[in-house]
Image (cartoon, rainbow, N blue to C red):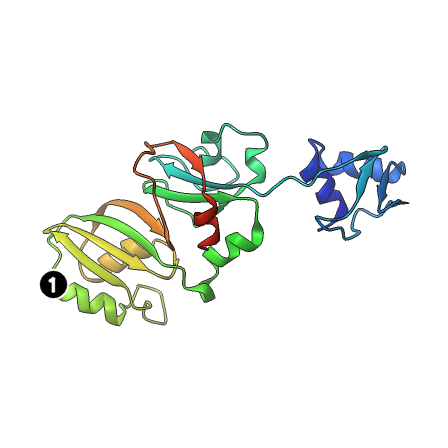
């Protein structure tokens, strides 16, 4: 990790404030003054600010039950960011692993561990996500095989990867996909002539949304949940 970023992770300092301290020679790494903000340091490095040893902040892993009308972004736009729901220090230093549309509810994972997040979001990892879907029209049994074989989305060259569809009721189903294309679930149902009217994510990988979490509520992941990714 870059030294300036390391200092920010261990303190409440901004990147520019950290660089000023480095320029002033107030930072020592393993006993030597270090002025280069890009110098590489590690969790076990002995980094001291004006003689005080800095402790590397542990990565945070959070499960959030996303409500409607908020966005999975670090920047407020038409709707506010879901990060406003997290009543913790430096919430906006976190990032969202697996985003949801503003009108979609359900499980969102939030962390500051980039490698852990990558294992969820990378297309190569094929991390499964399960959604509960409500549609405007009845879902035909034939949709099970069509989704298993892959469907052609508008403006896409290739078929979607095999998906698992479980029909629960005339207009309700569970859909498990391993991709994260733009509006994918809605576009898959549109491809078979149906429309999604309500969408809720229940699971990412082996992590299921805690039923005790109400809309807008969150908790830290357990060690077992973290290790499952």
Task: Name the residue at 44% across, 49% down.
Answer: 224
Would you place residue 108 above or below residue 154 in this image? above
Query: Residue reaching furthest front?
Result: 224
Task: Name the residue at 43% across, 35% down.
Answer: 219
Would you place residue 199 above or below residue 189 in this image? above
| Residue 84, image x, y percentages | 48, 30
What is the secondary structure assignment of the residue under circle 1?
A: loop
Query: Disc count in the image?
Result: 1
Nearer to us in this view, 113 or 124: 113
Nearer to us in this view, 198 or 39: 39
| Residue 106, image x, y percentages | 33, 42
Query: Residue reaching furthest top?
Result: 87
Q: Which residue is mark 1?
A: 141
Task: Name the residue at 76% across, 50% down.
Answer: 41
| Residue 114, image x, y percentages | 57, 51
Give the quadrant of residue 33.
top right
Disc 1 crowd rating (10 Å Cα; few below 14, some 14-19, many 20+) is few
Could you tell whether 25 is left or right of 208 in the image?
A: right
Give the quadrant of residue 129.
bottom left
- Is residue 97 among the parts visible in the rendering? no
- Is residue 82 among the parts visible in the rendering? yes
């Amino acid at each position: 990790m870059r030294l300036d970023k390391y200092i920010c992770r261990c303190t409440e300092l901004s990147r520019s404030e950290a660089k000023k301290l480095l320029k002033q020679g107030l930072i020592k790494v393993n006993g030597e003054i270090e002025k280069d903000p890009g110098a590489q340091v590690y969790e076990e490095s002995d980094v001291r600010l004006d003689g005080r040893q800095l402790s590397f902040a542990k990565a945070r892993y959070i499960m959030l039950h996303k409500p409607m009308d908020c966005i999975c972004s670090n920047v407020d736009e038409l709707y506010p960011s879901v990060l406003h729901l997290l009543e913790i220090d430096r919430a906006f230093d976190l990032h969202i692993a697996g985003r949801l549309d503003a009108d979609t509810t359900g499980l969102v994972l939030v962390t500051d561990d980039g490698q852990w997040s990558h294992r969820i979001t990378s297309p190569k990892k094929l991390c499964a996500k399960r959604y509960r879907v409500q549609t405007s029209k009845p879902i035909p049994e034939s949709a099970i095989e069509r989704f298993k074989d892959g469907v052609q989305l508008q403006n896409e060259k290739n078929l979607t990867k095999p998906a698992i569809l479980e029909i629960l009721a005339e207009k309700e189903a569970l859909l498990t996909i391993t991709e994260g294309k733009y509006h994918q679930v809605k576009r898959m149902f549109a491809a078979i002539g149906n429309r999604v009217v309500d969408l809720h994510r229940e699971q990412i990988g082996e992590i299921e949304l805690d039923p005790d979490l109400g809309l807008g509520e969150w908790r830290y992941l357990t060690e077992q949940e973290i290790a499952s990714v």
